[in-house]
Image (spheres, helix red, strand yellow):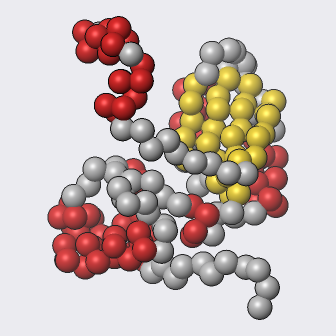
Amino acid sequence: MGNKRHRPELDKYDVAILSALAINTRLTTVELSQKVHLSRTAVSRRIAALKRMNVLNDAGDILNYESIGFKVRASVEIAAPGQSVSLLKRSLLQRPEVLSVAVMAGDGLLCLDVIAVDMEHLHGFIESLQESGDTTTKIVFAEEKSQLTLVERMQRLGEEAVVGLVRG
C-alpha cells in the first residue's frame, strides 16, 4: 500500500466553508450558512468533520493545508526595488499559492508565505516570480505554534512591559 497519507475527501461545500474561513475566521455559522447556501446545522456538522480530519484546528481558524493536498510550505522573499511594491503585492495576493505577503524593510522586499502541491509546483511558481525580482526560498519542514495565551505572554514579558502595553 505504500506510505502515502489518505487525503480527506472534500466536496464543494467543504471547500466553500474553508475558503470563507480563510478570508474571515470570525464568521459565525449563520454567516457561513448564508455564504455557502447550507443550513446552520449542516455548516456546524461540516466544521466538526473538518476538525476531526485535521483540516481545521480546534479554534477553526487555521487551515492545515497539508491535509488537503498542499504538501509543501515555503517562505519566499522577492527583492524588487524597481517595481511598485503595492502593485506587486496586489498581484501576488491573487495567486493561489500565496497565503500572505509581508512588506519588509529594504528596497522592495516582500516576504511571501506560500503553499504548493509538490516541489515541482513550487519550482514552477518560483520561476514565474523571476521576472518580478531576485528570489530567495526557504522550505518549511516543520512548524509548531506557541500555545501561550495572551495573558501568559504578558506575564512572561514582566510587569514593566505589561504596563507599557496597557498604556500604549
At 17% from the left edge and 64% from the top edge, which residue is drawn? Answer: 30
Among the 4 quarters of the image, the one containing residue 110: top right
Report if residue 45 is visible in the image.
Answer: yes
Report if residue 13 is visible in the image.
Answer: no
Please name whichever residue, 128 or 168, is drawn nearer the observer in this view of the structure.
168
Please name whichever residue, 65 or 89, is drawn nearer the observer in this view of the structure.
65
Q: Quadrant of the N terminus?
A: bottom right
Q: In the rendered image of this protein, does residue 94 appear above or below residue 117?
A: above
Pinpoint residue 39: horizontal percent, then vertical percent.
Answer: 19, 77
Left or right of residue 89, residue 168 in this image:
left
At 71% from the left edge and 57% from the top edge, which residue is drawn? Answer: 72
At 80% from the left edge and 59% from the top edge, which residue is drawn? Answer: 119
Q: In the rendered image of this protein, does residue 53 appear above or below residue 82?
A: below
Pinpoint residue 67: horizontal percent, then vertical percent.
Answer: 58, 68
* Extreme-bottom residue of the structure: 1
Pinpoint residue 8: horizontal percent, then vertical percent.
Answer: 54, 79
Pinpoint residue 46: horizontal percent, then vertical percent.
Answer: 34, 76
